[in-house]
Amino acid sequence: MFSLELKQIFNNIGSHLPIEHSFDMSNYEVNGANPIKKPVKVTGEVNNKAGIVGLAVQAQVEYSSECDRCAAPVIKVFNIPIKHILVTELNDKNNSDFTVVPSMRLDLEELVAEEISLYLPTKFLCNEDCKGICTFCGKNLNEDSCSCKKPIDPRLEVLQQLLDK
Ligand SMILES: [Zn+2]
Ligand SMILES: [Zn+2]
């Protein structure tokens, strides 16, 4: 746990606190794998503009996984912008525009980890045009083509049977 002490920021209009922090998310699990092997880098600041305290950081995440179509290893770097208005208390608990920081301390890692989990896509491809693997012969179609016949759509098969009669 890494918490930012923000009393000075809340109490001083125009003040700011630079943030440069790295932390480990190697235990973060997606489908039984741990795709975030390198530390997550967080840079930015918390500032007080005219009495409004805002967090504006960018989280850099290197994500290693396998292509969902061809299983080739894929490494992608995401730069995730994270912006929050911080308040010490909130009357309306259903208002999600603000992040409450009780006692003016913010658990930065918890907040950033949550944002990352919301931001990351659920499917990863080595390439948008990945041709995948032939389901019949198992060839990686990005490297080689195969002569397997395309499966017939079951709906078309029914039509074919009707025509044959
Ligand atoms: Zn692929
Ligand atoms: Zn094939």
Image: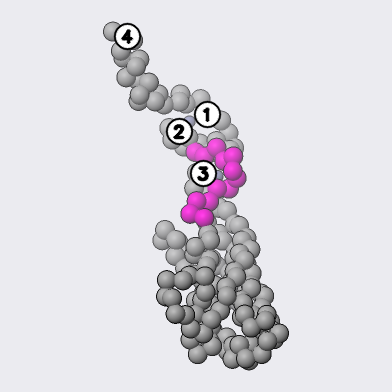
Q: Earlier in the sequence, mark 2 or mark 3?
A: 3
The amino acid sitting under disc 2 is: Cys
Q: Are marks 2 and 1 in contact (CB under 8 Å)?
A: yes
Q: For the residue labelled by badge 4, is the local secondary structure a helix, a strand or a loop?
A: helix
Which mark is nearer the camera, 4 or 2? 4
The amino acid sitting under disc 1 is: Cys
Figure quadrant, ligand 1? top right
Q: CA distance from mark 4 to mark 3?
A: 37 Å
The amino acid sitting under disc 3 is: Cys
Q: For the residue labelled by badge 3, is the local secondary structure a helix, a strand or a loop?
A: loop
Q: Which mark is residue 70?
A: 3
Q: Would residue 121 appear left or right of 8 to someone viewing this image?
A: left
- Residue marked by disc 1: 146
Q: Which mark is residue 164?
A: 4
Q: Earlier in the sequence, mark 4 or mark 3?
A: 3
The crowd level at tag 1 (other Cα within 10 Å; few <14, some 14-19, many 20+) is: few
Q: CA distance from mark 2 to mark 3?
A: 13 Å
Q: Are marks 1 and 4 in contact (CB under 8 Å)?
A: no
Residue 155 point in image, percent of width and height: 35, 24
Q: Please check the rendered image and state whether residue 125 is part of the magenta-colored stretch, yes or no.
A: yes
Residue 141 point in image, percent of width and height: 55, 35
The amino acid sitting under disc 4 is: Asp
Q: Please check the rendered image and state whether residue 37 is part of the magenta-colored stretch, yes or no.
A: no
Residue farthest to the left, as pictured: 165
Q: Earlier in the sequence, mark 4 or mark 2?
A: 2
Is any atom of residue 154 visible in this view?
Answer: yes
Q: For the residue labelled by badge 2, is the local secondary structure a helix, a strand or a loop?
A: loop
Most foreground residue, 41 or 3:
3
Q: Is mark 2 within 8 Å of ligand 2?
A: yes
